[in-house]
Image: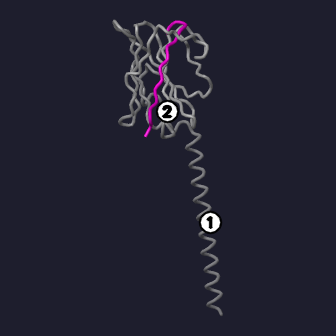
Amino acid sequence: MKNYKTNQSHTKRNIISVIIIVVVVLIAYTSTSFALKLWPFTQPTPSDTQSDSTSTSTDSSKDNIPSSDNGSTKTTDQVPVDTALNATINTLEQKNGLVTFNGSVSPALAGGTCSLTFTNPNDKPINRTSESTTDNTSSVCKQITVPETEFSYLGTWTTTFRYFVGEKQVVATKDIVIQ
C-alpha cells in the first residue's frame, strides 16, 4: 500500500509541474507577442533604409500630404487632379528584402513632391515621400525603398503614386504582391 501512495504522490507532483511549465510558457509567449506588436522601436527606422531625401509616415487617417512645398495642409482629396499631366510607375518590385519604386511625370514640372502610399485592407498604410529632379521631358522621383518587413501581411497591396506640384496633383496606381 505504501508503494501505491508514493506513486500517487509522484504522479500528482509531475502533473502539477507540467501545468506550471505550460502556464509559464503561455505567459512568456503572450508577453513576447504583445511586446513585439506594440513597441515601435522593434521596427526598422527610416534612417536604416532610406536616404535623407525621403520621409516616412504610417498615419492611418486620410493622407495629409502637402500639395506643394509651400506648407499647404490640404488632404489629397482636396487637391485637384491635373489631367494634362501623366504619372508613370516605372519600377515597382520586391527584391533582396526591399520594395523599390521609381516614378516619373510628363511633361517636366520643376519643384514637385513625389508621394507613395501602399494600402492593404488588413493593415495601416505605408507612406513615403521624396523629391524629384527634372530633365528635358519629365520629372523623375528619387528612388524610394521600403523594407519588406514593414508589410505585415503577405498578398496584394495597392500602390498609389501621387506627384504634387503647385496646387495640383497627378495620380497613378498599381498593385504589388508581397511574398
Q: Residue at position x 57%, y 54% from top?
A: 29
Give the camera-side residue of 39 and 105.
Answer: 105
Percent position (x, y) of residue 81? 54, 11
Image-based side of 120 in relation to 132, left or right = right
Q: Residue at position x 58%, y 21% from top?
A: 63
Label 1 vs label 2, nearer the camera: 2
Q: Is residue 172 magenta?
A: yes
- Residue furthest out toward the bottom: 1
Q: Main secondary structure of the magenta part?
A: strand
Q: Is residue 25 magenta?
A: no
Say what amino acid the circle numbered 1 marks: Ile
Percent position (x, y) of residue 45? 48, 31
Percent position (x, y) of residue 116? 48, 23
Question: What colour scheme does the image use?
Answer: one colour
Residue indicated by mark 2: 157
Q: Which mark is residue 3?
A: none
Secondary element under disc 2, as helix, strand or loop, is strand
Residue indicated by mark 1: 20
Is residue 42 placed above or below 50 in the rendered structure? below
Is residue 138 placed above or below 61 in the rendered structure? above
N-terminal label among 1 and 2: 1
Q: Quadrant of the C terminus?
A: top left
Say what amino acid the circle numbered 2 marks: Trp
What residue range appears in magenta? 165-179
